[in-house]
Structures are given as C-alpha cells and as structure tokens.
C-alpha cells in the first residue's frame, strides 16, 4: 500500500495487441431467461484487485469501493482500532488512525477519463435537450436492440447495420442541431477493424494508451458490450472478438465523426476540446496513479471491515456444534445462503435429521428439452451439458405447454407485443383483477422425467448414471452411512412480474429452479440397475434407503415434494415447521407478516418478493457437523467437505473450481451493484423494460442495456441491505493440502493471491486454528481480539 504513488503504466504493446487485450476485458452478461450473477471485472482477475479498481474507476467514473459514509457508520460500532491496525499490517500500510479518518472526509473528486464528445459537451450543447454523449449512448443502444430483433438474413455485421442506418438518418442532425452530420458517417471505413485503426490514428492515441481508450469506450456501452461478450462465450473466442469489435467500432466511430465534423463547423470549440483531450492522453499514467493513491486509505478501511466480519464468523465457528442423534433422514440442500437458516431451523427441532450442502445442480450437468423445441441449461455457466432431459407428458399437457411458451414469445417479441395486448388484453382483465385483489398461492410444476440422453444423443447408460451418482454421494460423505430417507432439495423463487427473476433462482442451475436436477438424480439413485452398477464402484445402497426429490421455494419457505413421493407424514411436517419458523424470522426484514410471505410472490406489483442473496459474505467448505446449530445469519454458502477422506484433493479441487467461483461471481455482482448501481446495477425496477424478448432490460426507454441487480434487490427504501465485502472462504483442511490443490487450480489461486477472494485455512484443535492465505504464503491470524 505504501507504493500507492507509483505510476500505473498502461501496457506498452503493439496497437493490435492493445485493442485485442481491451476487448478481452469485457465480462459476459447472460440473457434474462438464464440470467446468472457475474463478476463484472472477471476478465481482469489476473491483476491485483487494487490496480484494477483504480483503473476501472478512472476509465468510467464508477465508485467500486464503498462510500465513506458507510465506513463512518461502521466505525466504533463494528470496526475497531484493532481491525484497522491488522488491515494496515496485511496491506503493508501505515496505520495512522487520524489520517485514515481524514481520508473519509476527503471530498475531492477523483480524476476521471472523458471521451472527446464529453469535452465537446463542456463547450456548449448542440441540442437544447441532449448532450452529445447521452445521444451517442441512446443511438447506439437503440440500434443494437433493433439489430437483435431482425428476422431472416441479417447484414454482414452489427457495425455494417449501424453504419447503413446512421448514414441515412436525417432526423439525427435535426435533433442535435448538426446540419450535414450524416455526410461524415458516409466516409467511415467499411469494416470494424479498419474503423478502430482509423479512429485511434485520427484521435492521436498512442499504442501505450490504446488499450485503455478502447476499454473506456466499451465501458460507455458496457451493457451491449457484455451482451456481445456473451455471444463469444456461446460460440468461441473468434466470435467473441468479432462481435465486441463491432460494438467498439460503433462507439469509436462516433468520436471520429464528431472530431471531424466540429473541426469543420466549429473550429474554436473543437480546438479547445481537442487540447483537453490531448492533455488527458499525455497525463494518462499520472492520473491513474492519483486515483490509486487517493483510494489507498479506503482499501485499509475495506480490509478492516472484512476482518471484523471474519472475526465474528470464525469466533462463532470455534463454538461446540450440535450433535446428531440416530439419523432417520439426510437432506441435501443447495449451498445457497438462503438455505442456511432453513437448514438450521430444520435441525434445531429434529436431531434425527442431518442436512448437507452441495451445489444446487447436484452434479447433474443437465439441459432440458422444453415445449416449443428450445432447450434450457440447468448447470453452472462455466460448464457444458452432459445430459439432455426430455419430458414424458401426455399430448394435452404438451400442447398446453407449447401454447404457454408461444404466448410468452408473442408477448415479449418487439413486433408483436403491442398487437398481442390488443388481441388478448380484454381476456386477461379478469386474471389481472383476481391476481391483484386475491392472489393465489404459487403452484410448483411437478416433473415427469422422460428419457435422459448423453452428450452424443444416446440414452444414458446405467454405468454413466452410476459414475455420476457415486461422485455426488462421495462429495456428500454418506456412502457408508446412508439414512433410511435421503432428500435431494433444489430451490426456486416463485414470484411474478420480475424480468430478472432468474437471478433469484439457482445460480448453479443456470438461473433455473433446481427441481429438474434433483428429480433426475433421485430417479437414478432409486433405479435398481444404477444401484447394481454402483456396486462395482464399491458403493452399496441398502434396499431400505429411499431417495426423494423436493424444491424449496425461497419466497415462501415452503418445501414441495414430487407427487409420487412416499415420505412419512412426520418428516413432511418437520419441513413445514422449519419453513414456518424461517418465515417468522424473515418477515420483519421485509416489513411483512409470516403469513404475508405465503402470498408475497403472487403480488405482481411487489418490488421486493425476497432479498435473494443480499448480504452474502462467506463460503464454508467443511463437514456439516462442524457448523450444525451455529447461527450464520443467512450470509454463508455451506458446502459439504471431509478433508480426511479426500487424500488426493480431487473433491476440494472441484469445489473451489466451480461452486466457489460461482459464489465469487455472486459476491462481486452484489458488491458492485451496491457500491455503484448506476454503473454496475440495473437501476429502478419499476422502470424496467425488457429488450428483445429476453436479452436484458432498459431503465425506462433510453440508455444502455443494464447489467447487475436492480436497486430494490439490495435497498429497502431507507437503507442498503447488503454489506459490500469480498468473499471470505473458509476450508477445513490442512494448509499443505490446500496449497497442493491450488497448484492444480491456477485461476482460483490467482483470485486469492491478487486479492479478489480471501482464503482461510481452518484446523480445529490446533494452536493456530485459522490462517490466512496471502501472496507470501499462510499468515496466522488472531481472531480472538
């Protein structure tokens, strides 16, 4: 930290490499029907988090670190002098409390990069209502949205479509008071690659600054840039670069056109704007270093806040957990933080029930073939499907499903949505009135699984199923101690009128509910052929053990069982009581009653059906017996893990490479949506308009495609409901064991050593039970304070 004043240099690389590097820095955003959390800075993960935050803060004017007011609220209530001292020591910074307090009072604005168009706006508007910069974002966004709605054969590229449209748009010059502007568009290069080269040369950008200039322009339209990045994640690196090149070229083309146009029609204002632009380029490294230096005290405050949370968490983990009695049931839940309080309530009154944590897709990398012919992915965004599930429905059910799917498509598609309202609006009036006055409880669709196909399109064999089932049972640690009843409990969030609903569903299931995965796994585990195949893997499932599938609705805290489930009534009632208790605990935080939560998701005007994963902060990888009965406040992901039986580290490798990375994505999405909802959130949920059926949302009818969470997802109208902390991961295993696994997981190791995630080794009953992983190695931390 005491090197904060060092100049932060842009990488001095050839121009083409700099542009390519900038394009690769954009993280993807999934469409709304499979919307999952993403770290917006994921593509920067190989660099120290402090440097990345300083750079992104400078290039787009975002506030990624928490605001000073929040640190002031934490001071002397949660944060103490000792936390600041330990944070400063870890960051190699001076611990001058007065200086740190004064830094919170520093109201100086941070230096910020500005496009030429913004310098031009400072000289005076061409339009009485719009700035050039606002019109650029609006025009690009509308053109991108139109392009995605094109039917049939599309133009060669998004850039070509945009160039043809803007060159013939005679209304734009009138709107902006810029007569003859369209003629300058007609002179632009025909390809995006040529345009970017031309633009950098025209604007006088050196190779040393080219990467940051390109990245800053993409951040101006980060929503559509993230959409373009997702196209690449679907189709491969070549398409990724191509589509992002189109978005970059369009944004840069605007700067080139305004540069040339104002040089002709307003040379004096152009000259002043040009001088400020050139001065900014000359001072680029110095301005970045200034941002880094001004932010350095805030990193001490943030690390201190994280230490305060870790102190409370690890002190709690030091307590003696509850013990189980003769176990009659084992229930495997998703690791989602919303499962933790439900599991605690279930176990508290039922010592014969043991709960376990596993990623909510339960190891079944599944896609489902749905009505209408399209497929849905039920697996983490980083994985590819291994199996495809079809449904064994009767023709009437299938037809009803297809009709529902077609209606949804017509309501969401741009060309038909308004005609659709005219056609069936009156027919929907009764339904709308009923749902407003007397909403009905949610109905969970039960599944009738049909055939499961492998990735080659062939029916999955008993051996394939057994291999997957064995891995799940081994992860859960119950291969030698199966209870008479084993429940696989996915989760869903049943609520209405929320375009971002998938963000409340299971992230490990690709933004879908977890019932399909749970049902498939249970079907296999009850299959005699699969049980026979498991014997060759040295796993014996007693005939008396039955597996059952269920789904936990995180809005109502009700657990819905599959129709054919023969679970004894007293076990069903245990889940009902746990749900009722959890509703009583959650209701005050939503300003509602416990009974009110049962219908909250059915109120189509409800802005806050639940808090989702707000306030998540920790991830514990340990046996449940180490945390049973401990109140973790619904802030912690819980994944089952027994280090003693994982001698080769293979299970830990799988946990930190997939579920932990998903949790990190969730943590960073919530953090950045909280610290700057304008830049990295989705704004006001009341104003959301769906774009292109399911591509994303606009806030209102203008501006960029929005990324991140709506403000209502993390703010109760009076205050924030999420503490902006990085994820703290606690692994119950030896430091040497963890290190050996990290060597096989370079991406995860980078996340830890570069400061994106905190990793803590937990070895109970040792002189130093908790140790923190740093760049230099393991550091013993005293959390007793």
Image (cartoon, rainbow, N blue to C red):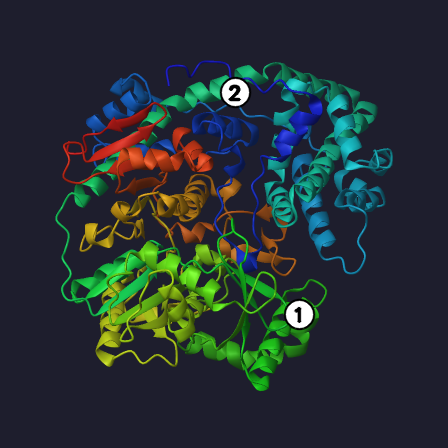
Mark 1 lies on a secondary structure that is helix
Picture mark count: 2
In the rendered view, tell whether residue 400 sits above or below residue 99. below
**Where does residue 584 sit, x and y in percent of width and height?**
24, 65
Q: Is residue 536 left or right of residue 47?
A: left
**Where does residue 96 sit, x and y in percent of width and height?**
27, 17
Q: Earlier in the sequence, mark 1 or mark 2?
A: 2
**Where does residue 670 sit, x and y in percent of width and height?**
42, 45
In the rendered view, tell whether residue 59 sits above or below residue 674. above
Which one is in front, 122 or 30? 30
Q: Is residue 677 left or right of residue 322?
A: right
Task: Name the quadrant of the N terminus.
Answer: top left
**For the residue carrying disc 2, how many other residues have a C-alpha within 10 Å: few (<14), some (14-19), or many (20+)?**
many
One can see residue 501 in this view:
yes
Which one is in front, 596 or 785? 785
Q: Residue at x 56, y 48 (%)?
A: 29
Q: Residue at x 79, y 47 (%)?
A: 161
**For the residue carrying disc 1, how many other residues have a C-alpha within 10 Å: few (<14), some (14-19), or many (20+)?**
some
- Answer with the quarter of the image where residue 751 lies: top left
Task: Name the quadrant of the C terminus.
Answer: top left
One can see residue 494 in this view:
no
Q: Are the residues tagged 1 and 2 within 8 Å (C-beta)?
A: no
Q: Residue at x 53, y 18 (%)?
A: 287
Spatial CA span between label 1 and label 2 = 48 Å
- Residue designated by label 2: 288
Which one is in front, 602 or 727? 727
- Residue designated by label 1: 410
Judged from this view, the residue extending furthest toward the front is 536
In the rendered view, tell whether residue 452 sits above or below residue 219. below
């Amino acid at each position: 930290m005491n090197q904060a004043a060092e100049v932060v240099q842009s990488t001095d690389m050839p121009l083409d490499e700099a542009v390519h590097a900038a394009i690769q820095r954009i993280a993807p955003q999934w469409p709304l029907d499979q919307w999952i959390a993403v770290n917006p800075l994921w593509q920067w993960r190989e660099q120290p988090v402090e440097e990345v935050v300083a750079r992104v803060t400078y290039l787009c004017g975002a506030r990624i670190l928490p605001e000073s007011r929040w640190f002031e609220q934490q001071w002397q209530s949660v944060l103490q002098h000792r936390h600041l001292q330990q944070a400063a020591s870890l960051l190699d910074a001076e611990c001058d409390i007065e200086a740190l307090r004064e830094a919170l009072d520093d109201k100086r604005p941070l230096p910020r990069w500005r496009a030429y168009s913004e310098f031009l706006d400072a000289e005076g508007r061409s339009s009485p209502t719009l700035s050039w910069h606002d019109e650029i974002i609006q025009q690009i966004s509308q053109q991108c949205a139109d392009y995605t709605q094109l039917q049939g054969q599309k133009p060669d590229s998004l850039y070509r479509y945009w160039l043809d449209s803007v060159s013939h748009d005679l209304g734009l010059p009138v709107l902006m008071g810029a007569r003859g502007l369209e003629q300058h568009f007609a002179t632009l290069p025909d390809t995006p690659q040529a345009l970017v080269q031309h633009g950098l040369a025209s604007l006088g950008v050196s190779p040393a600054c080219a990467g940051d200039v390109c990245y800053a322009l993409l951040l101006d339209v980060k929503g559509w840039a993230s959409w373009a990045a997702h196209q690449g994640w679907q189709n491969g690196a070549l398409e990724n670069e191509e589509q992002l090149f189109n978005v970059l070229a369009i944004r840069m083309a605007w700067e080139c056109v305004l540069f040339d146009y104002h040089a002709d029609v307003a040379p004096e204002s152009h000259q002043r704007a040009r001088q400020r632009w050139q001065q900014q380029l000359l001072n680029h490294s110095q301005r970045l270093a200034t941002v880094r230096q001004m932010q350095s005290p805030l990193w001490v405050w943030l690390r201190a806040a994280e230490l305060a949370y870790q102190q409370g968490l690890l002190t709690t983990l030091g307590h003696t957990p509850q013990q189980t009695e003769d176990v009659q049931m084992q229930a495997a839940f998703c690791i989602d933080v919303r499962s933790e309080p439900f599991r605690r309530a279930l176990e508290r009154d039922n010592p014969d029930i043991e709960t376990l944590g596993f990623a909510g897709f339960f190891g079944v990398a599944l896609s489902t073939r749905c009505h209408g012919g399209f497929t849905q992915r039920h697996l983490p965004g980083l994985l590819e499907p291994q199996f495809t599930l079809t449904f064994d429905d009767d023709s009437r059910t299938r037809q009803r499903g297809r009709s529902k799917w077609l209606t949804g498509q017509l309501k969401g598609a741009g060309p038909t949505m308004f005609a659709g309202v005219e056609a069936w609006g009156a027919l929907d009036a009764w339904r709308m009135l009923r749902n407003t006055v007397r909403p009905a409880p949610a109905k969970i669709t039960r599944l009738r699984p049909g055939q499961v196909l492998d990735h080659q399109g062939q029916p999955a064999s008993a051996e394939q199923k057994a291999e997957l089932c064995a891995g799940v049972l081994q992860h859960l640690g119950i291969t030698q101690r199966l209870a008479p009843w084993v429940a696989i409990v996915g989760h869903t969030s049943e609520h209405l009128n929320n375009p971002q609903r998938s963000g409340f569903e299971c992230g490990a299931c690709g933004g879908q509910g977890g019932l399909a995965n749970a049902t498939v796994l249970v079907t296999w585990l009850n299959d005699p052929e699969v049980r026979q195949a498991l014997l060759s893997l040295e796993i014996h499932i007693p005939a008396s053990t039955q597996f059952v599938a269920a789904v936990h609705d995180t809005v109502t805290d009700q657990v819905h069982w599959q129709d054919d489930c023969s679970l004894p009534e007293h076990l069903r009632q245990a889940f009902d009581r746990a749900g009722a208790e959890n509703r009583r605990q959650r209701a005050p935080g939503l300003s509602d009653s416990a009974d009110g939560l049962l219908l909250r998701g059915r109120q189509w005007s409800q802005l806050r059906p639940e808090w989702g994963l707000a306030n998540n902060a920790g991830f514990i990888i340990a046996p449940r017996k180490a945390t049973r009965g401990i109140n973790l406040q619904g802030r912690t992901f819980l994944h089952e893990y027994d280090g003693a039986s994982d001698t080769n580290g293979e299970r830990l490798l799988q946990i930190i490479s997939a579920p932990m990375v998903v949790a990190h994505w969730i943590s960073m999405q919530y953090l950045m949506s909280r610290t700057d909802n304008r830049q990295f959130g989705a704004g006001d949920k009341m104003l959301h308009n769906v774009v292109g059926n399911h591509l994303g949302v606009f806030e209102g009818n203008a501006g960029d495609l929005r990324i991140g969470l709506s403000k209502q997802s993390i703010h109760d109208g009076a205050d924030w409901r999420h503490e902006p902390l990085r994820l703290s991961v606690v692994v119950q295993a030896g430091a040497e064991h963890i290190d050996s696994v990290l060597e096989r997981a370079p991406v995860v190791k980078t996340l830890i050593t570069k400061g994106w995630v905190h990793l803590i080794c937990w070895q109970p009953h040792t002189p130093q039970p908790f140790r923190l992983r740093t760049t230099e190695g393991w550091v013993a931390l005293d959390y007793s304070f």
